[in-house]
């Protein structure tokens, strides 16, 4: 019985009794509805009776009034007419779409109906007036209302006639006749009204009885079905309970979870076998206790576990805890415990039971997953690519910071939006939205491998050039669980590419096109000249006096001069013409579709423009000029190299002829032919350097008057082998090498080869001791700081004694670069190298510079020596150079000692050394050169 009054027992009782209670209430409701209908029908019948009675009374009073003419009879007739007229007003009101029920109620009250019956009459009329059961009574009532109206009108006329005084008897008789006629017509109508209403009442009774019986049968069947259903449910419940008990037993035996049951009042606890095993205990350890249970909890987690248990016991909050336990063996494991408690009637907890699930593996996986996710998150937030991830529904789930910057959408505003909302991509060339690409990403789930040439329309309306890649995200089963999109902003790359393209074709200082772009355009012009017979011209401009400005005022002034000249030249050219900076102070101009006469005028105009220009720097004026080479292209077949070489040669000749002039290239120009010959030597010199086709000779230098006791003294001489292996003397190729700045490369080859040969000779121990090996250096090498370092490197590499090397420099090159020459000599003499001043006496200021050049030897120019026996002047020059050299502490060497007489005269004068054919002819220097010459022979 107590169990019945529990919450669960009460609910079960309600579930069982509620269907039957519903059946009883339905029956009661049906009965009350039937009684209400019957009561309304009864009231309707009563109202008809009152209506008929009042009509008869009205006819009687009106007939009596016509005879007595008494006002009281007329008033009685009116009161009697009020009954059917009141019913008439009530019906007319109820027939309205929105009736005033108070007006209808008042009409029925005037009709003599009882106030308790009026609501039933109104309900019956409003809800059943269109039913066939009431159709005939209501139709009779409607006809009767029309006759009542006629009767009321006749009463009014009769009253008016009597009230007028002394009515004629014929009038009264006619009125009585009409009243009786109306009565005669109403009498059968009233009978039909009463009969049809009675029949309708009986049909309603029979219908209600049938409906009541039918519903009662249905409810009885329903009640029977409910009873059977409840019985079957009870059987199913018992069966399910049995299965549940068996399942629980199997779960307890086979589950990997440990179960515990704490009897709070008895203060004892139960462990399932699995929990005992999980905690590391055995059956031999005795019964567990709540204290032991708490002692298994890791100390740092104990406070939170206690708080959770307390909150559950006293506040009934959910108890689902994850914490660490320490097993008996000391192992640390993660567990999840879910528990539920019960309380007594006083609300005090009396029992609590729960489970232990070992989640150590899950926790480790979570830690690894968190670390991996954190690494991935940091990586996504750090990379320069824009990353967008979508769910399977195509809605945005994540944007990394780069994607937020690129799309101008924040993660908060974009999350949950369709991809098409935040990613509007159009073709860069067409400008049309790329629907196929978006569909491929969203619908097909196919990867998109680096789609290029796209424009991203950002949230702020700006456009960014991007490359797009997309890959589906799949789970372990291979099912697609999302999509990742990677957008690479290539706008910077495009800018860099455009900038690089511009820089590749333009000069940074002036903004003009560079040599590469100029040669490309010239190549196109050559094709049109050949194929379409168009006339073009090419100008090669080299500024005069640019070096003066650059050396005097610095590179900043030189750069500014180049910029101003480029602007000045461009202003005097057509828009169709091309001007380029070819390098340094050199410019190129391509005049397309330009006749010969016009090209000459343009060239002269540019020359005059530069000549009239005055450059100011730091309030210092400079006047410069320009040397211009001109070549006209008129359909002839040329190569690019030939054209550039020809126009360069023409410019060079313009400089050699005095600068600030124009020189036009012509095929019959002898000066240009010479220039071209030198250009050909450039190719041969470079080829000789690459293929090692230079060779060395040596010529002895002997002491005069006394024998040398320190070893041999000789000068290294350079030769070249042509394509037929013939020796080429230096005067054939050295001028071209000097003009085109190839001498430093030749000097490096000579120094390196001499040092290597000397080192090899020392290693093999062959030959005589070397007192001095003289090596000629060009002025370009003497003025090159890199060459100074090169000599030092060769010294370290081959370990040649510096005292055995004597570098010869010409007087003219030393004077031309006096400061650099002096520095070069001082640096190398400081470590032991010796120097000779070659061709001394050829310059006008030889003696003036001699005292400031720290050389060891003076080589008297051979032009004085070879004719000294026949020319007193040459003799005097040789004698003077020798004396002054000795006064300065320098030894002298005479060149061109071709015979014994000259050698004897030089000895008499006191010259220290002599060199020439009279001493000895040049011979191959080193083993390698000897082999080469043997092969040639």
Image (cartoon, rainbow, N blue to C red):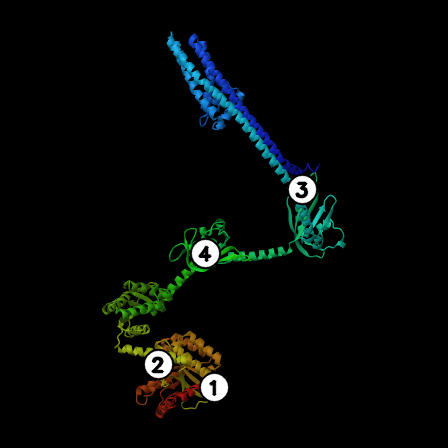
Instruction: State the residue position of label 1.
Output: 761
Of badges 2 and 3, the one in the foreground is 3
Q: Position of residue 612 (x, y in %)?
A: 27, 65
Residue under label 4: 440
Residue 366 shown left or right of residue 91 in the figure: right
Residue 809: give x, y in percent of width and height: 39, 80
The answer to which of marks 3 and 4 sits earlier in the sequence is 3
Contact (Cβ within 8 Å) of mark 4 with mark 2: no
In space, the residues marked 3 and 4 are separated at their CA atoms by 58 Å
Q: Return the residue at label 3.
A: 314
Q: Report the quarter where the C terminus lies.
A: bottom left
Q: CA distance from mark 1 to mark 2?
A: 29 Å
Label 1–label 4 contact, CB within 8 A: no
Describe the element under mark 4 as helix, strand or loop.
helix
What is the secondary structure assignment of the residue under circle 1? helix
Distance from the alpha carbon under mark 4 to that under mark 2: 71 Å
Q: Quadrant of residue 724?
A: bottom left
Which residue is disc 2 drawn over?
Answer: 733
Name the front one of labels 1 and 3. Answer: 3
* Quarter of the figure that contains the N terminus: top right
Towards the viewer: 144 or 191: 191
Element marked by disc 3? helix
Is residue 124 depicted above or below 279 in this figure? Answer: above
Residue contact at pointers 2 and 3, CB within 8 angstroms:
no
Which callout, 1 or 4, points at the residue further toward the start of the chain? 4
């Amino acid at each position: 019985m107590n169990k019945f009054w529990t919450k669960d027992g009460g609910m079960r009782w309600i579930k069982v009794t509620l269907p039957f209670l519903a059946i009883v209430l339905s029956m009661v409701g049906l009965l009350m509805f039937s009684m209400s209908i019957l009561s309304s029908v009864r009231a309707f019948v009563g109202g008809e009776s009152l209506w008929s009675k009042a009509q008869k009374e009205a006819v009687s009073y009106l007939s009596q009034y016509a005879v007595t003419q008494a006002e009281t009879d007329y008033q009685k007739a009116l009161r009697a007419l009020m009954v059917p007229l009141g019913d008439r007003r009530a019906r007319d009101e109820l027939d309205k779409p929105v009736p005033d029920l108070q007006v209808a109620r008042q009409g029925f009250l005037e009709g003599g109906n009882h106030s308790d019956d009026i609501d039933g009459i109104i309900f019956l009329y409003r809800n059943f007036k269109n039913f066939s059961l009431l159709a005939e009574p209501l139709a009779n009532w409607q006809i009767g209302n029309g006759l009542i109206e006629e009767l009321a009108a006749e009463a009014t006329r009769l009253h008016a006639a009597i009230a007028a005084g002394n009515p004629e008897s014929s009038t009264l008789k006619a009125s009585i006749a009409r009243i009786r006629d109306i009565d005669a017509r109403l009498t059968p109508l009233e009978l039909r009204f009463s009969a049809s209403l009675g029949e309708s009442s009986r049909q309603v009774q029979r219908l209600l009885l049938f409906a009541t019986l039918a519903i009662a049968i249905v409810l009885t069947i329903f009640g029977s079905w409910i009873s059977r259903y409840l019985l079957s449910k009870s059987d199913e419940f018992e069966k399910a309970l049995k299965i549940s008990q068996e399942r629980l037993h199997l779960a307890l035996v086979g589950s990997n979870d440990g179960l515990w049951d704490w009897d709070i009042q008895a203060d004892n606890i139960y462990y399932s076998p699995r929990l005992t095993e999980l905690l590391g205990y055995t059956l031999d350890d005795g019964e567990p206790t709540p204290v032991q249970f708490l002692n298994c909890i890791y100390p740092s987690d104990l406070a939170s576990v206690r708080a959770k248990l307390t909150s559950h016991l006293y506040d009934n909050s959910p108890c689902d805890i994850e914490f660490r336990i320490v097993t008996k063996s000391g192992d640390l494991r993660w567990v999840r415990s879910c528990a539920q408690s019960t309380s007594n009637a006083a609300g005090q907890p009396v029992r609590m039971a729960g489970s232990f699930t070992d989640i150590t593996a899950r926790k480790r996986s979570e830690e690894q997953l968190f670390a991996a996710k954190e690494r991935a998150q940091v990586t996504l937030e750090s990379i320069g690519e824009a990353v967008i991830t979508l769910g399977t529904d195509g809605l945005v789930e994540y944007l990394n910071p780069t994607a937020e910057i690129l799309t101008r959408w924040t993660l908060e505003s974009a999350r949950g939006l369709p991809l098409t909302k935040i990613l509007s991509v159009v073709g860069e060339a067409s400008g049309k939205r790329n629907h196929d690409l978006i569909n491929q990403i969203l619908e097909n789930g196919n990867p998109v491998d680096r789609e290029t040439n796209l424009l991203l329309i950002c949230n702020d309306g700006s456009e960014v050039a991007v490359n797009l890649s997309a890959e589906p995200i799949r789970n372990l089963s291979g099912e697609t669980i999302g999509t990742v999109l990677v957008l690479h902003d290539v706008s910077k790359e495009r800018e860099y590419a455009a900038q690089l393209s511009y820089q590749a074709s333009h000069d940074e200082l002036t903004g003009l096109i560079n040599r590469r772009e100029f040669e490309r355009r010239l190549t196109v012009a050559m094709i049109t000249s050949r194929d379409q017979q168009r006339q073009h011209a090419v100008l090669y401009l080299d500024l005069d006096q640019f070096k003066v400005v650059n050396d005097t005022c610095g590179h900043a002034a030189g750069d500014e001069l180049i910029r101003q000249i480029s602007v000045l030249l461009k202003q005097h050219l057509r828009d169709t013409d091309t001007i380029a900076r070819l390098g340094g102070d050199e410019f190129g101009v391509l005049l397309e579709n330009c006749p010969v006469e016009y090209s000459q005028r343009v060239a002269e105009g540019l020359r005059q423009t530069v000549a009239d220009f005055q450059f100011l720097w730091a309030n210092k004026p400079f006047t410069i000029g320009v040397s211009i080479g001109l070549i006209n292209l008129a359909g002839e077949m040329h190569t690019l190299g030939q054209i550039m070489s020809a126009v360069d040669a023409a410019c060079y000749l313009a400089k050699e002829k005095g600068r600030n002039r124009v020189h036009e290239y012509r095929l019959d120009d002898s000066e240009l032919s010479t220039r071209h010959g030198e250009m050909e030597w450039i190719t041969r010199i470079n080829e000789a350097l690459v293929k090692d086709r230079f060779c060395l000779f040596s010529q002895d230098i002997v002491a005069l008057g006394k024998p040398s006791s320190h070893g041999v003294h000789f000068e290294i001489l350079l030769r070249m082998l042509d394509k037929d292996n013939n020796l080429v003397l230096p005067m054939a190729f050295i001028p071209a090498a000097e003009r085109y700045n190839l001498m430093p490369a030749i000097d490096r080859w000579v120094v390196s080869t001499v040092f290597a040969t000397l080192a090899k000779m020392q290693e093999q121990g062959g030959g005589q001791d070397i007192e001095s090996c003289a090596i000629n250096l060009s002025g370009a090498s003497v003025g090159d700081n890199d060459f100074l370092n090169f000599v030092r490197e060769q010294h370290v590499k081959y370990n040649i004694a510096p005292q055995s090397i004597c570098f010869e420099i010409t007087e003219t090159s030393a004077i031309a670069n006096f400061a650099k020459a002096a520095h070069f000599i001082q640096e190398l003499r400081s470590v032991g190298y010796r120097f000779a001043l070659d061709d001394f006496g050829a310059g006008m200021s030889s003696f003036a510079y001699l005292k400031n050049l720290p050389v060891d030897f003076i080589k008297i120019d051979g032009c004085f020596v070879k004719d000294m026996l026949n020319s007193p002047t040459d003799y005097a020059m040789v004698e003077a150079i020798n004396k002054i050299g000795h006064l300065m502490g320098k030894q002298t060497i005479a060149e061109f000692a071709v015979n014994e007489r000259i050698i004897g005269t030089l000895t008499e004068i006191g010259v220290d050394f002599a060199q020439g054919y009279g001493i000895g002819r040049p011979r191959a220097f080193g083993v390698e050169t000897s082999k080469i010459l043997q092969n040639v022979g």
